[in-house]
Image (cartoon, helix red, strand yellow):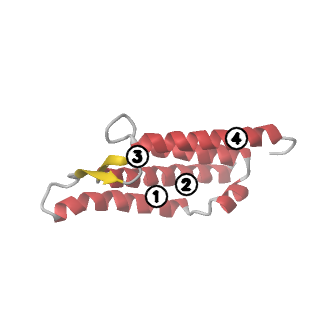
């Protein structure tokens, strides 16, 4: 952007932090409440899209030097591998396991393998959305 956009850049820093926090909350609450990897990934990728709008693509890539095609591929692989882990153990594909653990700071916390699957979905969504956005921006 050209011109004096100090207010836009300052506000976007705060808004990006809020969007990232909300996206992580949606991701983590997904296996018990509405949310999960898909919507969490969309919200997280919207923070990056906001950064692309406020700053230019080169500036954002200096701060986030990721190849989003590889991020999408890794996410898809992670989601599939989380399902095949159950199949290797003789359970149906994508069967999930969970347990309650007493963690030092958090207390008794439920840990579930569905979080691994949701992480794969989130990474796939982030990688795909960012790849599409970057492809569209090359045409403009």
The image's mark for residue 12 is: 4
Q: Find numbered disc 2 in the image and state the secondary structure of the residue it sits on.
A: helix
- Residues at marks 1 and 4, CA–CA distance in whole angstroms: 26 Å
For image coordinates 24% across by 51% down, the residue present is: 99
- Residues at marks 3 and 4, CA–CA distance in whole angstroms: 24 Å
The residue under label 1 is 72
- Residues at marks 2 and 4, CA–CA distance in whole angstroms: 22 Å
The residue under label 3 is 37
Coordinates of residue 131 in the picture (x, y in percent):
55, 54
Disc nearer the start of the sequence (3/4): 4
Coordinates of residue 32 in the picture (x, y in percent):
31, 38
Disc nearer the start of the sequence (1/3): 3
For image coordinates 36% across by 60% down, the residue present is: 78
On screen, residue 71 above or below 128: below
For image coordinates 29% across by 59% down, the residue present is: 82
Disc nearer the start of the sequence (2/1): 1
Coordinates of residue 17 in the picture (x, y in percent):
61, 43
- Residues at marks 2 and 1, CA–CA distance in whole angstroms: 9 Å
The residue under label 2 is 131
Foreground disc of the pair 1, 4? 4
Q: Find numbered disc 1 in the image and state the secondary structure of the residue it sits on.
A: helix
């Amino acid at each position: 952007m050209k011109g004096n956009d100090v207010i836009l850049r300052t506000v976007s820093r705060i808004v990006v932090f809020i969007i990232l926090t909300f996206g992580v909350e949606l991701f983590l609450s997904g296996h018990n409440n509405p949310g999960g990897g898909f919507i969490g990934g969309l919200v997280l990728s919207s923070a990056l899209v906001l950064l692309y709008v406020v700053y230019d693509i080169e500036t954002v890539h200096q701060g986030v030097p990721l190849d989003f095609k590889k991020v999408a591929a890794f996410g898809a692989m992670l989601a599939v591998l989380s399902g095949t882990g159950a199949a290797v153990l003789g359970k149906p594909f994508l069967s999930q396991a969970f347990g309650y653990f007493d963690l030092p700071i958090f207390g008794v916390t439920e840990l579930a393998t569905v979080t691994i699957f949701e992480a794969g979905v989130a990474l796939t969504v982030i990688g795909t959305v960012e790849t599409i956005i970057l492809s569209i921006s090359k045409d403009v």
